[in-house]
Image (cartoon, coloured by chain):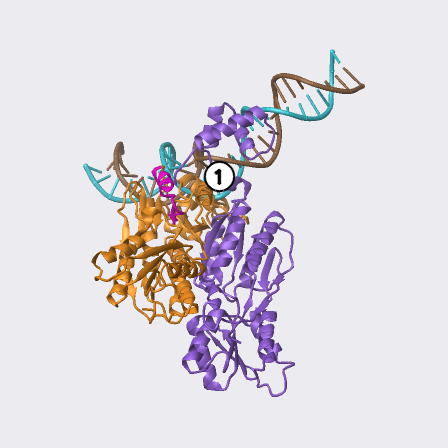
Chain colours: A purple, B orange, C cyan, D brown
Amino acid sequence: MATGATLRDVAYRVGVSPRTVSRVVNDEGGFSEATRARVLEAVEDLGYQPNMLARGLITRRSGTVGLVGVDMTDPFFPAMAEGIQNEARETGRTMFFACNDGDPRRQAEVFKSMLSHAVDGVIVFPAPGTVEELAAHARQGMPLVIVDDIVEFPNLASVSFDLEDGANQATQHLLATGRSRIAMIGSEVTVPRNRRRERGFLRAFENAPTGTAPPELVRVQPTVAGGSDGLAQLLERRSDLDGIFAFNDSMAVGAMRAAQSAGYRVPDDLAIVGCNDIELSGLVSPRLTTVRLDRPRLSAEAIRILNRLIEAPETNPAPLVLPVELVVREST
Amino acid sequence: MATGATLRDVAYRVGVSPRTVSRVVNDEGGFSEATRARVLEAVEDLGYQPNMLARGLITRRSGTVGLVGVDMTDPFFPAMAEGIQNEARETGRTMFFACNDGDPRRQAEVFKSMLSHAVDGVIVFPAPGTVEELAAHARQGMPLVIVDDIVEFPNLASVSFDLEDGANQATQHLLATGRSRIAMIGSEVTVPRNRRRERGFLRAFENAPTGTAPPELVRVQPTVAGGSDGLAQLLERRSDLDGIFAFNDSMAVGAMRAAQSAGYRVPDDLAIVGCNDIELSGLVSPRLTTVRLDRPRLSAEAIRILNRLIEAPETNPAPLVLPVELVVREST
DNA sequence: TCGGGCTACGTCAACGTTGACGCTATCGTT
DNA sequence: AACGATAGCGTCAACGTTGACGTAGCCCGA
């Protein structure tokens, strides 16, 4: 840690007290225009920068927020992280970052480290089954925004996409384009309460045309390889499937690869819909039909709500659920 | 900021002084086994966590490191960031994260914010043309590791891949497989000093077979769309190209898409080699021949060297250049 | 002329922790 | 028995900043 000039150094050079320099730096008022100019000049000369540790120690605001993601290698995540980081910077906060790898124990660990660094608030993509635990931190006064789950607890906000609707739209689209033997490739790392895509998928069959086969479902790892596995498992159950909805685009691409290798034509024999609209989806052939999520919007909302929670900890915002949009491309 | 128990609270409960609790917590020695047990029990009961702000204020070690990336949406970066974060966590440091978006001014801004939070060191993927500026920070005592550039300055380390060799291997491979009209699609956001891929590319032509056309080169944005642009520009110059080396895989994929749209068969008419081996490269068809970089290795080395620099600021490590490997797949 | 209010500062303590140092009881050595 | 060393604490100050409060000088109105 390179230690620079302090308030005292600036004060000594200008010939005022450190308190006055502090007032100028924080623009608190209570100083003359002449003093202000001389202080700012000295600040510039000495390259003074406020020490956020000392400031945070006394104001109990460290000027930092934490972002806890699941897994950077999930292609859905980086754009979100960048968006959140930019928004945080624009509101003058520096961002801690860590991953929980979907592991509750690791999440607890990184959370602890952020707490000890006195973060002003945290945005979390929760590891499975950790919502209650996070709520406990919120109750103790830590402003918290949970992304990608819908929960209501005091001092805790949640922001998510309407994935139940997205899955429903995707499945309805498969049904509407004449598919009748439809399966979903789900993720095995979800908790029952938060299986919104599965609910939307199943709900689409309530008004399905007669002759529609009952929906099939497998749960696999939410990766390209998992998607391939999932498709193989489904084809073993019934080889005449003609429609697939996948938990995310990576899995959809994996399923598409596996289907093509097994001799199925996409979309002629088998239509595939993904979810998330990652960049990859527009680069495979056929280009993937998918559910588009407005990630910049979610980043912005997450930080906005976190900032509100930091300013006014007693507020209790309602869960925010953002609309999604089906993007029909070539795989259906 | 939720404020928890302090050393005083623990001390009061145990009936010792805060200094003794501090000694136990930091395992400094100078206490009896009985005291240790009672302190640790109280620490557990009260959920005491050291306040890193206060600790950092006095020890001049904040227990944080900074990571400054260029752009999260570059598919090459997230895996690196995750690796670095994990390594940092394992050495007990929490990681700040920010992007410079390739903009020197933004980089200066995020650097300043990290400095004011008293980071112990920073790992930077530098924005173009900022190496001197970063070296100045290093001279002032900030331990710094620069990734993806080869520089030598006091108190500053650099870690990078041998991209000159990678580009050379890739181009030699094109020549060895009978290509004779070869172009490179370079990136326009590089500074001359650091155009290592271009040097490796050009060097391959020194011993090229007779009848090999002089190398072509365009510089475009380092994205999928840029790769498409680049290929279009090159084909305007000469439509009989039969080999392409691209600055990175995203550009290679863009070039491949553009070539296929223009009626070229890959690899029959046009062989394409990328660089970086991102996940996408194995998912497009034909699968991309590319230069593989050992990203986990680089993450680990970067943190390891940074830790050394933090422990012993006077050391002056030599630039570390990691070997790379050509992966031949279907696009050549 | 007095007092009330305001401007433009300064002083002091505190945030939670650790470095430097001091003190006491005990133990082993001579 | 006297002495030094050591173990096991405690005390105090400091890190750089800001909150709370004090105060000197001035202006203005009554």
Q: Which residues are magenta?
A: B121-139
Residue D28 lies, in percent from the top left, at 74, 19
Indicate the position of residue B116 as horizontal and vertical percent values: 46, 40
- Is residue A80 in view? yes
Residue A149 lies in quadrant: bottom right
Q: Residue at x 47, y 38 (%)?
A: A51
Q: Find residue A101 and report its horizontal and vertical position in percent.
A: 44, 63
Q: Is residue B226 magenta?
A: no
Magenta stretch: includes residue B128: yes
The answer to whether A321 is drawn above or below residue A217 in the figure is above
Q: Is residue B141 left or right of residue A59?
A: left
Front in this rendered view, residue A43 or B128: B128
- Numbered-mark total: 1
Name the residue located 34 percent from the left edge and 58 percent from the top edge. B184
Q: Position of residue B36 (x, y in %)?
A: 40, 50
Question: As rendered, which of B212 and B141 lies closer to the eye?
Answer: B212
Visible residue check, residue B4 = no
Q: Give the side of residue A181 with respect to residue B295, left or right.
A: right
Q: Quadrant of the C terminus of chain B?
A: bottom left
For this orientation, the residue located farthest to the bottom is A211
Q: Secondary structure at mark 1?
A: helix
Circle 1: is it few (<14), some (14-19), or many (20+) Cα within 10 Å? Answer: some
In the image, is residue A86 above or below residue C1? below
Q: Amino acid at mark 1?
A: Ala
The chain letter for the residue carrying disc 1 is A
Whether residue C11 is situated above or below residue A93 in the rendered picture: above
Query: Which of A307/B105 is in front?
Result: B105
Q: Which residue is mark 1?
A: A54
